[in-house]
Amino acid sequence: MILLGDIPTRWSRLNPNKICMVCTGYGDVRYTWKQFNERINRLANSLKGLGLKKGDHVAILMENCHRFVELYYAMAKTGIIPVPLNFRLHPNELQHIILHSDSIGFIFGPEYKDTVEALRPALGDIKYYISAVDRIPGMLFYDDLVEKGSPEEPKVALKESDTVMLMYTGGTTGLPKGAVLTHRSLMTYTTGCVLSNLKSGIPSGDEDATLFILPAFHISLWPILAFHFTGDKVVMVNRPDLKKIFEAIQKEKVTHMNAVPTVYFWLVNDADIDKYDLSS
């Protein structure tokens, strides 16, 4: 079975110049498979260079952004285990998850700088604080890691049964519990989504694109994995802003979007809906 990190590696070879990632979170970016995989490799090798190794846990507190996806792939290539955090949780709940997961790294977006600073005294085991967007004195900077790392494929022995993600439950019946996802379980889930979509009539061609608006910390990240699995384009917005959604569908000719009923209600009842070409 293909491992999670094999996805960008494979498509960087098979279709290097195809656009695979478009993101409007924290500025607009467009990456081909070749560019995207190179960024992933540079990040992976820099994380290894810091001293992070297979089996280490790293917490991520960030809104939707191409960096979130880069981290998932980069850690999958190195055996480092991401612990995605629900940004809607109370700081005390975040603290519990970070400590319970034995995380030794903490990567965060600009909205959560104050939260991280407030939590820092209680997080004694965190060795690596990495700011994802803004440069913060005394912390590592994400873009520096991407710039300085080697573009070569990381050389780490990995197998299907290795943990690829530690995703915490919602905690509705108590404290959140860490659910272990392996490469095998995540990729079985991904291929099932691909097959289900093909069966239901969603096309699989060069022009397919999914608009991802749900939080990337959640198991609802399946459209990213499914569309990337087939080499197709993922378009991300950091939050379900209606104007950004309409603009993205029109500009990128989006063929698929996964959302919750509330978002669809907002969309179909928005006064500006007829101003956009949503035929794709």
Image (cartoon, rainbow, N blue to C red):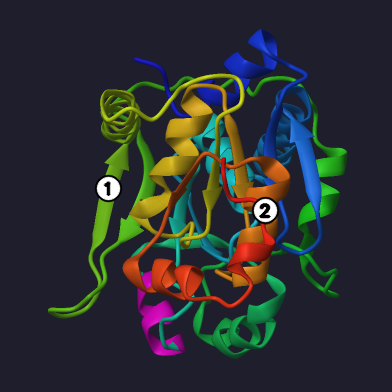
Give the residue displayed 47% in from the left and 19% down from the top.
157
- Disc 1 is placed on an element classified as strand
- 95 in magenta: yes
On the image, the x and y values in percent for residue 162 come to 34, 31
> Left or right: where does residue 203 sit relative to residue 212?
left
Amino acid on which the number 2 mark rests in the picture: Ala
- Disc 2 is placed on an element classified as helix
Q: Quadrant of residue 101?
A: bottom left
Amino acid on which the number 1 mark rests in the picture: Val
Q: Which residue is mark 2?
A: 248
Does any portion of residue 97 appear in the rendered image? yes
Q: Which residue is mark 1?
A: 180
> Left or right: where does residue 129 sit relative to residue 229?
right
* Disc nearer the start of the sequence (1/2): 1
Looking at the rendering, the stretch of residues picked out in magenta corresponds to 91-99
| Residue in the foreground of this view, choosing between 236 and 108 | 236
Q: Is residue 50 above or below residue 117?
A: above
On the image, the x and y values in percent for residue 54 come to 48, 37
On the image, the x and y values in percent for residue 203 come to 43, 25
> Left or right: where does residue 158 sit relative to residue 136?
left
Q: Are marks 1 and 2 in contact (CB under 8 Å)?
A: no
Q: Quadrant of the C terminus?
A: top right
Could you say which disc has been placed on residue 31 in the image?
none
